[in-house]
């Protein structure tokens, strides 16, 4: 776990994105960033182990029980990224605009490599949620949904 991949994928000297470091201790934040890149998507990020574990969700995250969304796991991001909004310049990785769609407290219940159960306390996403690893499409696919 670390930020090597995050740093390798970007030219941080030329991007407004934060450089960041792995944080000590356990924080408790989540953020969803609406990312208007080549394809509009929503980046879900959960603070786990000093970084933001990240998933790209191609459609709007579920606010009601019964809606399941595909979520593709992406590289870990620094915790500082949770405050990032702005425009990543053309030609760079992730080029396009980023704005915070929701953010709040993340309360983990069960976290492992294939099942994550947690509560989100944001203004759009509020309640008990799950991320479950699935073999659908690609190896980094998960399903993201709200639980009863
Ligand atoms: Mn993105």
Image (cartoon, grey):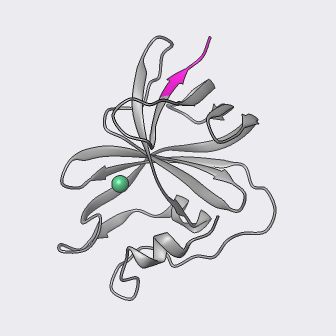
Residue farthest to the right, as pictured: 25
The N terminus lies in quadrant: bottom right
User: Which residue is drawn at the image coordinates 38% and 29% (left, top)?
Assistant: 136
Q: Nearer the viewer, residue 114 or 61?
A: 114
Q: Is residue 46 magenta?
A: no
User: Which residue is drawn at the image coordinates 58% and 67% (left, top)?
Assistant: 80
- Using the rendered view, name the quadrant where residue 106 is placed: top right
Q: Which residues are magenta?
A: 144-148
In percent of width and height, residue 113 lies at 64, 42
The answer to whether residue 79 is left or right of residue 38 is right
> Is the stretch drawn in magenta largely helix, strand or loop?
strand
Image height of 98 relative to 15, above or below:
above
The C terminus lies in quadrant: top right
Q: Nearer the viewer, residue 130 or 120?
A: 130
In percent of width and height, residue 2 lies at 62, 69
- Total count of labels: 0
In percent of width and height, residue 48 lies at 69, 52
In percent of width and height, residue 29 lies at 66, 49
The answer to whether residue 127 is left or right of residue 77 is right
Ligand 1 sits in which quadrant? bottom left
User: Which residue is drawn at the image coordinates 53% and 63% (left, top)?
Assistant: 77
Image height of 49 relative to 69, above or below:
below
- Using the rendered view, name the quadrant where residue 130 is placed: top right
Residue farthest to the bottom, as pictured: 13
């Amino acid at each position: 776990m670390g930020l090597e991949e995050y740093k390798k994928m970007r030219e941080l000297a030329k991007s407004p994105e934060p450089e960041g470091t792995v944080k000590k201790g356990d924080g408790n934040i989540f953020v969803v960033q609406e990312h208007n890149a080549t394809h509009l998507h929503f980046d879900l990020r959960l603070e786990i182990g000093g970084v933001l574990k990240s998933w790209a969700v191609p459609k709007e995250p579920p606010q009601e029980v019964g809606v399941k969304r595909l979520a593709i796991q992406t590289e870990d991001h620094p915790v500082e990224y949770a405050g990032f909004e702005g425009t990543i310049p053309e030609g760079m990785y992730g080029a396009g605009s980023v704005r915070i769609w929701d953010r709040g407290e993340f309360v983990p219940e069960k976290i492992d490599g294939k099942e994550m159960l947690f509560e989100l306390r944001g203004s759009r996403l509020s309640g008990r949620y799950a991320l479950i690893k699935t073999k659908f499409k690609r190896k980094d696919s998960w399903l993201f949904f709200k639980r009863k």
